[in-house]
Amino acid sequence: MEPTIVVGEVLHLDMDSYIFSKPARWDVVVFDDLEGVSGEFVSRIVGLPGEHVDINSKGLFINRREVKVPKKLRISQYEPPNFSKLYTNTNNLIRFPRIVEPGHYFVLGDNTTNSYDSRYWGDLEASKIIGKVFGK
């Protein structure tokens, strides 16, 4: 999540933030148990349930309209993920454009050239979100 969060930084997490509301676009969230890997992860919410998401070197498009992204989210430096390093079977790769599944969110790390995020493993299930990071 650099440059938004630096290695060793202490994060303050609001674990009650989504009791009475739903996550919003640009929220930085902590979630757990990603693809069978235990632990906590941090990403920024980009796509909401049911939205049409496209990302390419020209920018981020939500419902076919380009959206202005936070300065720390480096979409302008976006390069498609190199799946060949991770997958030998390319039949289940995330493809764009895509529609975010109901009850899920599309998340990105702010450093898109070096982030393991929804581009690799798909939409984040809402139930895996632990809370919102304060001030990010």
Image: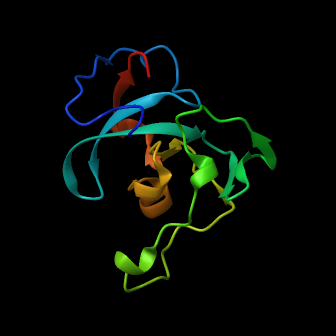
**Residue 99: quarter of image:** bottom right
Q: How is the image coloured?
A: rainbow
Instruction: Tell me where residue 62 appears, x and y as whole percent.
Output: 73, 45
Check the image and report above or below for 87 versus 9: below
Check the image and report above or below for 41 versus 28: below
Residue at image x 44%, y 23%?
A: 136
**Residue that lies at the very extreme toward the bottom in this rendered image:** 88
Image position of 93 (left or right of 14): right
Residue at image x 68%, y 45%?
A: 51
Image position of 82 (left or right of 25): left
Tell me how many marks there are: 0
Look at the image and tell me in which quarter the N terminus lies. Answer: top left
Q: Nearer the viewer, residue 79 or 20?
A: 79
Image position of 77 (left or right of 54): left
Instruction: Tell me where residue 28 appears, x and y as whole percent.
Output: 44, 30
Instruction: Tell me where residue 38 appears, x and y as whole percent.
Output: 18, 49
Q: Nearer the viewer, residue 18 or 136?
A: 136
Residue at image x 24%, y 27%?
A: 9
Residue at image x 46%, y 73%?
A: 82
**Residue 50: quarter of image:** top right
Q: Nearer the viewer, residue 121 or 82?
A: 82
Image position of 125 (left or right of 94): left
**Residue that lies at the very extreme toward the right in this rendered image:** 65
Instruction: Tell me where residue 5 appears, x and y as whole percent.
Output: 35, 32
